[in-house]
Image (cartoon, rainbow, N blue to C red):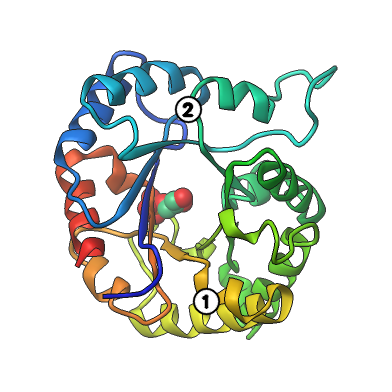
Amino acid sequence: MKSRETIVGGNWKMNTTLAGAPVLAEGVARAVPGGVSVAVFPPFPFLLPVRDALARAGAAGRVALGAQDAYFEPKGAFTGEVSLDMLRECGVTLVLAGHSERRHVLGESDELVGRKASAILAAGMRCVLCIGETLAERESGRTQGVNERQLRAGLRGVGPSNAERLVIAYEPVWAIGTGKAATPTDAREAHGHIRSVLGELLGGTAAERTPIMYGGSVTAANAASLMAQPDVDGALVGGASLKVDEFSAICAAAAG
Ligand code: 13P
């Protein structure tokens, strides 16, 4: 049993429907085991129906409601963006910052991700800072360098005092949605390095306490071997989080 919190998140990305999202949430709420923190990250328009479905299933405190993104400004002329106060009003308690698709499809910079991470923590919410290298970066031996750069920029406004609500998700870009997960050895090496950089940036106590999730083609079949690695403290799950049985089996693997 690990001393750190184990956390599994279902990132639904731009999937589900108004009718299907609450059904999925209720299914998850009924199926997930204890002994692991669980969160779901529905698309913005489905946050409220999912919140209500979790409450109906008696899981309001047990399955946390997450948002896939947020803007760092509190309000104003930012067409299309969503503020942290708005998300809080919808019952959101944790927010992703810098998901690979935000960085590589939507063009978010390290600096923007850092501003978002600081704002999420300052708003009193949990921040899941996502980092990870592309295939080209891995093949040219830059995995550690990229992770370190993204951590330094992402945590610029974070120190030992607000790191309490921080979670890191290591999601190698080449493993996301490809069916080609990192091997347990790849994950162990990357997570060990990430924890040592966290130690430099935040101090040893905060680094030891911060959960580091792995994401990228996690399934019920590979979850246990990934999460058996010493610094792998859970999973951020995309495709497999859309199926109740698969997602709850991953949660059960994380619970040990
Ligand atoms: P997949 O599990 O579909 O590879 O997606 C991972 C991910 O991006 C979770 O945030």
The x, y position of residue 43, in whole percent, is: 47, 27
Which residue corresponds to the image point at 64% horizontal and 72% vertical from the top-left?
Answer: 147
Q: Are marks 1 and 2 in contact (CB under 8 Å)?
A: no
Which residue corresponds to the image point at 74% horizontal and 71% vertical from the top-left?
Answer: 149
In this view, the mark in front (1 or 2)? 1
Res 23 quadrant in image: top left
Q: In the displayed orientation, state which residue is furthest to the right.
A: 77
Residue 177 vs residue 3, the one in the foreground = 3
Label 2 packing within 10 angstroms: few (<14), some (14-19), many (20+): many
Please state which amino acid type lies under the numbered disc 1: Glu
**Disc on the earlier residue, 1 or 2:** 2
The C terminus: image quadrant: bottom left
Could you tell me if residue 129 is visible in this image? Answer: no
**Residue designated by label 2:** 43
**Residue designated by label 1:** 208
Residue 150 vs residue 29, the one in the foreground = 29
Element under disc 2: loop
Label 1 packing within 10 angstroms: few (<14), some (14-19), many (20+): some
Alpha-carbon distance for marks 1 and 2? Answer: 31 Å
Which residue corresponds to the image point at 50% horizontal and 62% vertical from the top-left?
Answer: 171
